[in-house]
């Protein structure tokens, strides 16, 4: 298996975790009542899980296999600060604040446009190579998401703008992370994103007077924070490992396939009708397959 294939496979695992997390997070937010407090608790739990996994893996596999790379240049430090604050903190606040006043279908579609923004930025900042097959795959993924969202009509309200801002910040984070991974290990980025981002979220909660509501107060809240914290930890760890091995646009495109998992869970557990969504899910799967096949197919590069 080539390095790129391993990266795509890891991105597939990330998409699987993402699909489960999207379904489960709805229950977690409902149990908490405060979306910002919930995401702060969830992110802090994920940071603890990643730190624990790092310590255990380092002891069992050795420092050479599981390494934390210390930044050696100002560019590294600024980049890691961007990953922590503009990736692991600010977008979460913007997204959940926007979600409070925006339809969930509109929010979901906006978030899935992440691959479009990553492609645009990565071509310029990372000089990533895109073919017409890549563009076709991205088009299929966006068409499928549009259909799954119920032909959503985008409205430029404050909530929509907040969610769009969060998505753009996450796109910038993806590109910055990809550049940092040429010098730093995936473990470095995973720890920085979640530990640094959690600290920033806790500071924000203290400033806004929500720190007391971050700590779970019921058994249900503890359970949902623990479950979603583990899922988020798995997401971040596999995501950075995938990003270290394949193009940013490729792994971000595969991430969109998480919608397949969410739809299947909703159908199996909530008895949500899948027949009407089946064509869109098939288009989504076709787009994901095309991302994997793109470098193997004949055709001229766009960039």
Image (spheres, rainbow, N blue to C red):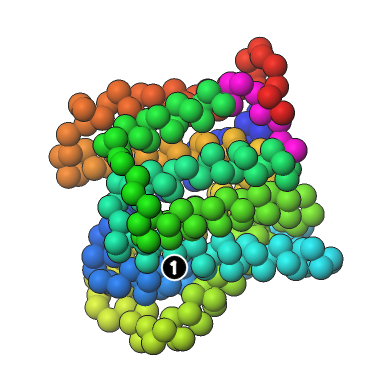
Q: Residue at x 29, y 61 (%)?
A: 101
- Residue 198 drawn at (x, y percent): 52, 73
Q: Residue at x 54, y 64 (%)?
A: 88
User: In which quadrant is the N terminus drawn?
Assistant: top right
Observer able to see residue 187: yes
Q: Main secondary structure of the magenta part?
A: loop
Relative to 123, does residue 204 appear above or below in the rendering? below
- Residue 197 drawn at (x, y percent): 55, 70
Q: Residue at x 39, y 24 (%)?
A: 283
- Residue 134 drawn at (x, y percent): 58, 26
Q: Residue at x 65, y 64 (%)?
A: 82
Nearest to the observer: residue 219 or residue 65: 219
- Is residue 95 one of those drawn in magenta? no
- Is residue 131 one of those drawn in magenta? yes
Relative to 114, does residue 97 appear above or below in the rendering? below
- Residue 120 drawn at (x, y percent): 62, 40
User: In which quadrant is the C terminus drawn?
Assistant: top right
Q: How many dots with numbers?
A: 1
Horizontal side, residue 75 vs residue 91: left or right? right
Q: Which residue is mark 1?
A: 93
Q: Secondary structure at mark 1?
A: helix
Query: Which residue reaches farthest top?
Result: 298
Q: Quadrant of residue 45?
A: bottom left
| Residues shaded magenta | 127-134
Horizontal side, residue 151 vs residue 179: left or right? left
Horizontal side, residue 102 vs residue 211: left or right? left
Crowd around label 1: few <14 · some 14–19 · many ≥20 (10 Å): many
């Amino acid at each position: 298996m080539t390095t790129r294939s391993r990266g795509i496979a890891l991105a597939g695992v990330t998409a699987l975790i993402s699909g489960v997390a999207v379904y489960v997070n709805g229950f977690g937010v409902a149990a908490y009542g405060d979306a910002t407090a919930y995401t702060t608790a969830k992110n802090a739990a994920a940071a603890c899980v990643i730190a624990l996994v790092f310590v255990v893996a380092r002891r069992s596999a050795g420092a050479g296999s599981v390494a934390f790379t210390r930044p050696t240049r100002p560019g590294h430090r600024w980049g890691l600060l961007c990953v922590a604050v503009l990736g692991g903190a600010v977008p979460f606040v913007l997204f959940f604040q926007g979600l409070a006043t925006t339809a969930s279908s509109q929010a979901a579609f906006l978030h899935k446009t992440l691959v479009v923004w990553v492609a645009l930025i990565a071509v310029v900042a990372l000089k990533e190579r895109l073919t017409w097959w890549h563009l076709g795959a991205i088009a299929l993924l966006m068409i499928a998401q549009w259909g799954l969202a119920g032909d959503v009509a985008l409205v430029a309200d404050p909530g929509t703008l907040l969610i769009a801002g969060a998505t753009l910040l996450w796109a910038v984070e993806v590109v910055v992370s990809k550049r940092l991974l040429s010098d730093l290990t995936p473990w470095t980025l995973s720890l920085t994103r979640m530990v640094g981002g959690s600290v920033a979220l806790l500071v924000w909660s203290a400033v806004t007077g929500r720190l007391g509501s971050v700590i779970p107060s019921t058994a249900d809240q503890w359970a949902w924070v623990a479950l979603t914290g583990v899922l988020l930890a798995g997401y971040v760890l596999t995501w950075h490992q995938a990003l270290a091995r394949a193009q940013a646009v490729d792994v971000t495109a595969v991430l969109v396939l998480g919608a397949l998992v969410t739809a299947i869970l909703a159908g199996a557990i909530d008895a949500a009708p899948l027949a009407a969504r089946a064509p869109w899910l098939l288009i989504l799967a076709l787009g994901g397959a095309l991302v994997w096949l793109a470098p193997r197919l004949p055709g001229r590069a766009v960039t």
